[in-house]
Amino acid sequence: MSIMRSTLIALSKNRALQDLIVRIPISRKMARRFVPGETLADAIAVVKQLNSQGILASLDHLGENVAGEAEAVAAADEYLVALDALNAAGAECNVSVKLTQMGLDLGDDFCLANVSRIVARAAELGNFVRVDMEGSPYTERTIGIYRRLRATYGNAGLVIQAYLHRSQGDVEALIADGMGHFRLCKGAYDEPETIAYRERSRVTQALNELARTCLSPEGRAQGAYAAIASHDTEVINFVRAYAYQHDIPPAAYEFQMLYGIRRELQTDLVQRGHRMRVYVPYGTHWYPYFMRRLAERPANLLFFLRALVGN
Ligand SMILES: Cc1cc2nc3c(=O)[nH]c(=O)nc-3n(C[C@H](O)[C@H](O)[C@H](O)COP(=O)(O)OP(=O)(O)OC[C@H]3O[C@@H](n4cnc5c(N)ncnc54)[C@H](O)[C@@H]3O)c2cc1C
């Protein structure tokens, strides 16, 4: 992982910089590439537009590491409103939640109770909740809460980060316990080499191995389902080839990408008969999400810095 990437991820947690960046009109404008709007109505309009192109969506109300219980409860309430609005709009869209937004820093039981309200409402509406994965201090507890959620509800899935050494074992254990509904991604945080692969090629290889574990006859026989969340053609081509060689129907897996990234590839995969879901974040707390997107691609940072200087 480059020093620049580590620095940007560290800066994504810097409150003073956040206060500065969110006030600059040019950064708001650039964030729009990745965060299509600040309101639920903005986000649903984007979801409907994606749906009209045959693309599914997952809605994320931006926010992480809330400071107190009232904020966590309000964040979950916003998801309840969003689920009802998606239902009323007839949108093909589930929701993604971050447990630190649901109060993970305030205790596991509190967080579980809060996120359960969302999963319960989604179940009533025939919808689904994806639990996003955050930095490694939260991995074990996130998996623990996911397991407790799945003990009651079938309509929840978990994100797995391929860069973590532990992930292959986590995936195998969860599949064995009938809880293998995953979004598989490379991982967006800055993790030490004691626990994570840091070379791009090794992370790609790990992601392909996780996809193979889920898509294998043994994995599917145990109910595993994989959403392959990557814009990397090496990963996408690996999955497509594996599915083709093993006669795996497109309904048995899906591809996922982030709003604003590789749009042509999104529509191309839909035209080839694949299921494609786009992650649509919305809200005013876009700063950490935006910084992680800058960290993923040096060209984004250069573009942003040029815009700032030229401003
Ligand atoms: C639907 C979805 C949900 C995710 N949820 C999580 C999560 O819960 N937890 C987590 O840690 N991570 C999450 N991620 C982020 C993920 O871990 C990676 O950081 C991110 O997807 C970049 O990795 P990549 O597989 O696309 O490969 P990369 O090798 O990073 O990128 C491959 C190519 O995609 C394009 N690309 C990638 N990123 C960008 C960008 N920011 N701007 C412009 N072009 C870009 C470039 O052309 C690049 O060459 C999610 C990703 C997706 C798609």
Image (spheres, helix red, strand yellow):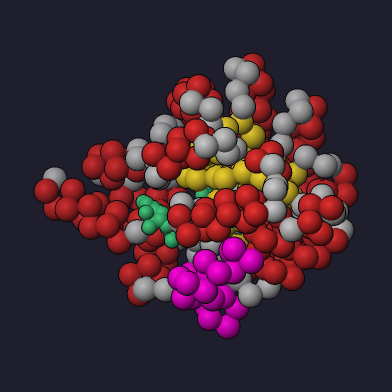
Q: In this view, does 37 lie above or below 173?
A: above
The percent coordinates of residue 230 (x first, y second) are: 51, 53
Q: In this view, does 160 lie above or below 259?
A: below
Residue numbers of the magenta segment: 190-209
Disc tally is 0
Q: Does the magenta stretch include residue 204?
A: yes
Q: Residue furthest bottom?
A: 194
Q: Is residue 231 magenta?
A: no
The percent coordinates of residue 198 (x first, y second) are: 48, 75
Indicate the quadrant containing the N terminus: top left, top right, bottom left or bottom right: bottom left
The percent coordinates of residue 116 (x first, y second) are: 77, 42
User: What residue sits 85% from the left and 61% below the top?
Assistant: 176
User: What residue sits 71% from the left and 62% below the top?
Assistant: 213
Indicate the quadrant containing the C terminus: top left, top right, bottom left or bottom right: top left
The percent coordinates of residue 192 (x first, y second) are: 52, 78
User: Front-most of 62 and 269?
Assistant: 269
User: What residue sits 84% from the left and 42% below the top?
Assistant: 153
Q: Can residue 44 be seen in this view?
A: no
Left of 124 or right of it: where is 57? left
Left of 120 or right of it: where is 209? left
Q: In this view, does 108 lie above or below 195?
A: above
Q: Is residue 203 above or below residue 18?
A: below
**Quadrant in which residue 166 is drawn:** bottom right
User: What residue sits 58% from the left and 63% below the top?
Assistant: 207
Q: Is residue 264 visible?
A: yes
